[in-house]
Structures are given as structure tokens and as C-alpha cells.
């Protein structure tokens, strides 16, 4: 399914609703670009679905008080260098969570373009942190200008924040 189909047919965002992923557990990386996970732990089509590790990140970050700005919005302050990589942010005053998902057909590397003023972060003091999330990603630290590897149909959840925060 294309990113446009995810936005219009699966997410519910155009209608002011949030969605969840059911069939086969969905895709956790792509789902996060639209604010979606699977429902509470269950099995479907032989797939064990358990979103609790992602929900833990939501709780630690305080996603309920963040402003979601998707890649489809012209003023999204985080963009990617590759046309097959999409990023949505969840912005708070001192920290932003970036959800990244790949629609590229092969492993690639991409970088971000940031609107630092809109993010309210000094680029000289910024760092990107991928928190450890079971069955999703390993703990990793990137600098804002780094090339970031991503596998097909996967992605990242990254905090962009001031160093030593």
C-alpha cells in the first residue's frame, strides 16, 4: 500500500480519527508515521502482535501532549533526503519524537533536513537518539547530519533533543 493509501484509507487522520492496524499485525514502522499500532496483545494470522514496547516509549515521551505534524503537511519541520522515506514528528517544547518509515524497495541511507527554528533546537546542541525497542530497533545515537541506514518496510523512532537533556 502506498503512503497516500496509508494516509487516506488506513489512518483515519483526514477524518479526525486515529486508527489501529489489524491484518497480520500491520507494519509498526509505517504505522507510527500515522500514529497507529496494533491493538493490545493478540494473535492474528499466525502473528503475535504486542505493541506494549512502543506504548512504553509513548508514555515515557508523553505523546498525548505532543503535536503531531505529518509528512503530508507543508510545514513539517523534518523532511528526509529520499523520496521513499517518510517522517512524521510528535513535537513537544523541549523534545521531538520522529517516526520514520521506508517505502524504498532496497536498503538505503538517508539524511534529514531540519527546520531548526520551528523545532526550537540549536543544531549545534542537537542529538538524535533511537531508544531500544524490543523487536523494533536497537539503541543508537546519530548526529543531525548523519546518513541513517534503513531497511525496506522498516524505519526508526528517534528523539531529537538537546545534548545532555
Image: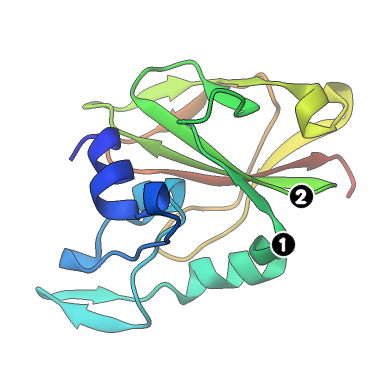
The residue where tag 1 is placed is: 65
Quarter location, residue 126: top right
State the image quarter where residue 63 is shown.
bottom right
What SS does tag 2 mark? Answer: loop
Q: Position of residue 111 (x, y in %)?
A: 55, 20
* Foreground pick, 148 / 87: 87
- Residue beneath the point at 37% across and 18% down: 83
Tell me: residue 23, above or below residue 143. below
21 and 14: which is toward the camera: 14
Q: Which mark is residue 34?
A: none
Q: Residues within 10 Å of mark 2 (few under 14, many from 20)?
A: some
Q: Is residue 152 left or right of residue 33?
A: left
Residue 38 in percent (x, y) is at 34, 69
Q: Residue at x 24, y 66 (%)?
A: 25
- Name above or below for residue 8 compared with residue 19: above
Mark 1, Cα crowd under 10 Å, few <14 / some 14-19 / many 20+, is few
Callouts 1 and 2 close, C-beta under 8 Å: yes
Q: State which quarter of the image contains the N terminus.
A: top left
Image x and y of residue 70, in percent: 51, 38
**Callout 1: SS:** helix
Q: Is residue 17 above or below residue 149?
A: below
Q: Is residue 29 visible?
A: no
Q: Say which residue appears at 70% left-offset and 68% top-offset.
A: 60
Q: CA distance from mark 1 to mark 2?
A: 7 Å
Q: From the viewer's perspective, tell me whether residue 50 is left or right of residue 93.
A: left
x, y (%) of residue 147? Answer: 54, 21
Q: Which color scheme does this rendered protein use?
A: rainbow
* Residue holding disc 2: 92
Does residue 76 appear to the left or right of 110 in the view shown?
A: right
Mark 1 and mark 2 lie on one chain; the one further toward the N terminus is: 1
Q: Residue at x 9, y 73 (%)?
A: 45
The answer, for residue 6, to whether it is visible in the render is yes
Amino acid at each position: 500500500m502506498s503512503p497516500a493509501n496509508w494516509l487516506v484509507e488506513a489512518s483515519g487522520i483526514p477524518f479526525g480519527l486515529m486508527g489501529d492496524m489489524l491484518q497480520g499485525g500491520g507494519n509498526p514502522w509505517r504505522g507510527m508515521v500515522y500514529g497507529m499500532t496494533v491493538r493490545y496483545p493478540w494473535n492474528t494470522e499466525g502473528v503475535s502482535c504486542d505493541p506494549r514496547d512502543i506504548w512504553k516509549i509513548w508514555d515515557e515521551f508523553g505523546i498525548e501532549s505532543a503535536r503531531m505534524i505529518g509528512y503530508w503537511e507543508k510545514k513539517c519541520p523534518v523532511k528526509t533526503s529520499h523520496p521513499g522515506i517518510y517522517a512524521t514528528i510528535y513535537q513537544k517544547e523541549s523534545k521531538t519524537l520522529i517516526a520514520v518509515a521506508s517505502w524504498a524497495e532496497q536498503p538505503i541511507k538517508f539524511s534529514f533536513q531540519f527546520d531548526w527554528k520551528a523545532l526550537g533546537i540549536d543544531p549545534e546542541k542537537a542529538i538524535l537518539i533511537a531508544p531500544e525497542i524490543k523487536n523494533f530497533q536497537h539503541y543508537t545515537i546519530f548526529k543531525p547530519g548523519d546518513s541513517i541506514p534503513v531497511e525496506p518496510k522498516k524505519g526508526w523512532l528517534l528523539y531529537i533533543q538537546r545534548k545532555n537533556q
